[in-house]
Amino acid sequence: MADHSALPLVVLAEQFAKLPGIGMKSAQRLAYHVMEMSQSEVDEFVRAVQAAKKTVHTCPVCQNFTEQQLCRFCGDTRRDHSTVCVVETPKDISAFERTKEYKGVYHVLHGLISPIDGVGPDMLKIKELLARVNQGGIAEVIMATNPTVEGEATAMYISKLLKPFGVKVTRLAFGLPIGGMLEYADEVTLYKALENRNEI
C-alpha cells in the first residue's frame, strides 16, 4: 500500500491494523472506505470515538464499562448481589444476558493470565475482586473465563486466592467447547453450562 497510496492513507490503515482481529488487508479496506465517506459521516465517526473514550469508564465495583457512576448491573437492586460471575471481558456479559436466566452480578477481569503474552495477575482486575469479596455479602463466585488454557489457569489461580474467604467458588460446566469463545456460544449451550456449573 505504501508504494501506491498517499502517506496519510497508509497511516490510517496502520491505525486500523492495530485493532484486534483486523489484518492489513482489512485495514486497507477500512481506510479506503473512510475516504469514500462524506465529511459529515467522518466527523460523526470521529465524534463517536472521542465521546466513547471520554465518557465511558470502568465501574468502580465490577470493572464493567459504563458512562454512569455504577454500571446498570451493580446499580440494579433487583439483581442478586450475593452471586458474582467473573468474566474475561465486558463483551462476555452480553453473552450471559442473552440467556435471560442469570440474575446475579458480574466482575470483569479485562484479560487472562498469560505469561507467554507477558500478562501477569497484577495486570488484571483480581485485586478489585478480592477487595469486593472481603467486604462481605458474596456467597458464590462463578468463574466464567473461556475454556482455554489461559482461562483455566486464571480460574484456578483466582479460586485459590478466594478459598480463605470461605465463599463458594464454582466453574462453568463443560457444555462449552474447549478453545471456544463465550461471545459465540448459543443461548442454550451457555444456559446449560451455567446451570451445571461445578465447585472448584
Image (tube, rainbow, N blue to C red):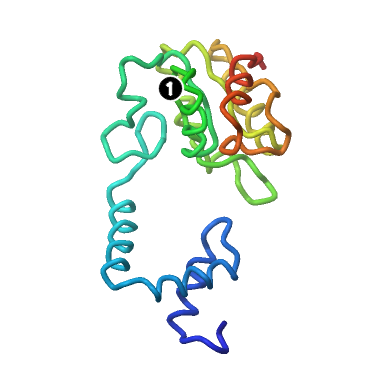
Q: Is residue 166 above or below residue 156?
A: above
Query: What count of labels does the image hold?
Result: 1
Residue 165 location (% of width, % of height):
53, 14
Q: Is residue 82 left or right of residue 163?
A: left
10 Å crowding of disc 1: few (<14), some (14-19), many (20+)? many
Q: Which residue is drawn at 44% across and 18% down?
A: 104
**Could you tell me residue 27's position as x and y percent?**
53, 68
Q: Is residue 66 left or right of residue 17?
A: left
On the rendered image, what quadrant is the N terminus found in?
bottom right
Judged from the image, the secondary structure of the residue bearing numbered disc 1 is: strand
Q: Position of residue 85 (x, y in %)?
A: 51, 23
Please determine whether, in this image, residue 113 is positioned above or below residue 102.
below
Between 40 and 145, the residue placed more toward the observer is 40
Residue at x 46% of width, y 38% of height: 90
Placement of the C terminus among the 4 image quadrants: top right
Classify 43 as above or below 161. Answer: below
Picture residue at 49% right of the left edge, 25% below the top? 130
Q: In this view, does 106 lie to the left or right of 70?
A: right
- Identify the residue shown where x is 64% and y is 29%: 157
Determine which residue is flagged by label 1.
105
Q: In which quarter of the image is residue 12?
A: bottom left
Up the image or down, 38 lies above or below 73; here it is: below
* Amino acid marked by disc 1: Val
How far across and how far down the image is residue 91, in percent?
48, 39
